[in-house]
Amino acid sequence: MRGRARATLTAMSEVVHGAARRFGIPAALLWPRVLRRFFLDRFSVAELRAYAPFVGEVLDTLPVVISKEASLDRLARINPRGLQWQTEDKEKFYGICVSKGIPHPRVCAVIGNGRDTRHGELPTHFISKDQGGAYASGFAVFERTDADQVRVNAGPPEPLKDVLERLARGRSSLLLQERLFDHPGLQALSARPVLQSARINTFRAAEGRCRLLFWMIKLVTGRNFSDNFSGGRSGNLIAFGAPDSGKLLGARTLHPSGVGLTTILNHPETNRPLAGFTVPLWQEAVATALQAHRHFPDFGALGWDVAITADGPKILEANAWWDPPTYAPQIMAADDWRAIFG
């Protein structure tokens, strides 16, 4: 416990001194603000590092100041915890997708934690994900080089039988799914054959009408296979755009100081313009998320991870306990901020 407390204090000190360098505020003034956010407002150190919600110029951009942990209480007012299995248990979620005709990647197997259930032949490209996890837990990519060999995360070929046996012995219950790839127009931004999903959040009013809350695109950088943002620590980007169109305005990334986010207008690796880029099939992707929400009538607000592929949009996941868009607060209307998280 003492070691954990010491590590937390060290991480806080890094946040304070990084913010002092970036914003020109004495560390002595920042310490009480950081401690208040951590102990009273339930912000994690990772959130403090990513969002700097203790600095005046950042706070001026936030309609509501709320941590991820505190946001769960607000979301529970409109998303029933008793029905969270519909979205948080991925095997059951995909079962609903099948029954309702919601486009999604094919589930090939459920493996691990005492289970080994196969659904036909594994495709050339497939992924694993934790059945009940979040933030890319259990994620890996697989490429079959022939009938009996497979590469894991672009590593050397291994016998497929050995890999599956290793997964089956694991303590996590994993879903194996076909791996999807970006629409060529979206792939052009990063020039890599990956999947950069759209996050499309929708709201269902009491009378049943569904509407768009906000949207963004998670862009992959470096050697990452997952598009998980992790507060900017992964190096990946969150690209944001106009609320009523698929045209990007820029992307958010971790500031060089290591504290808080900053906006960039060009992809850091390909130098391709982000501002002005039109996301392919954006209207179709939004329509797919809105249609999917109609099949989950008990949930007031859901965050959909949507793959935009050459074959059209496909739903990857639904998230009842989604993060407030503190990373780019302008993408959600201030009235919606206050209605959901106020």
Image (cartoon, rainbow, N blue to C red):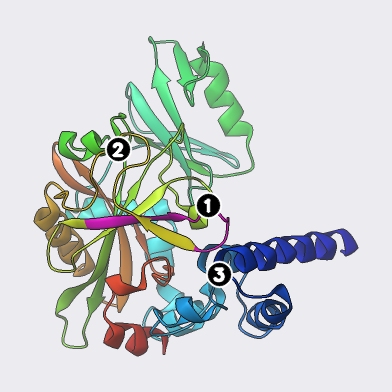
Left or right side of 155 for 123:
left
User: What's under tag 3, amino acid-wise?
Assistant: Phe
User: What's under tag 1, amino acid-wise?
Assistant: Pro
Which of the 4 image quadrants contains residue 301? bottom left
Label at residue 256:
1
Q: Which of marks 3 and 2 precedes in the sequence?
A: 3
Q: What residue did someone put label 3 on?
A: 23
Q: Nearer the viewer, residue 50 or 108?
A: 50
The answer to whether mark 1 and mark 3 are in CB contact below 8 A is: no
Q: Nearer the viewer, residue 218 or 340?
A: 218
Q: What residue did someone put label 2 on?
A: 271
Q: Nearer the viewer, residue 287 or 53?
A: 53
Q: Residues within 10 Å of mark 3 (few under 14, many from 20)?
A: some
Q: Quadrant of the N terminus?
A: bottom right
Left or right side of 98 for 174:
right
Give the CA distance from mark 1 to mark 3.
12 Å
Give the CA distance from mark 2 to mark 1.
18 Å
Give the CA distance from mark 2 to mark 3.
27 Å
Task: Give the magenta part as a residue range.
Answer: 249-260
Q: Secondary structure at mark 2?
A: loop
Query: Residue at 44% across / 49% down in the picture?
Result: 228
Residue 279 spot, x, y in % from top left: 16, 49
- Nearer the observer: mark 2 or 3; the answer is 3
Q: Which of marks 3 and 1 precedes in the sequence?
A: 3
Query: Residue at 26% across / 80% down in the picture?
Result: 333
- Nearer the observer: mark 1 or 3; the answer is 3
Query: Residue at 42% across / 60% down in the picture?
Result: 262
Residue 55 spot, x, y in % from top left: 54, 77
Residue 185 spot, x, y in % from top left: 16, 38
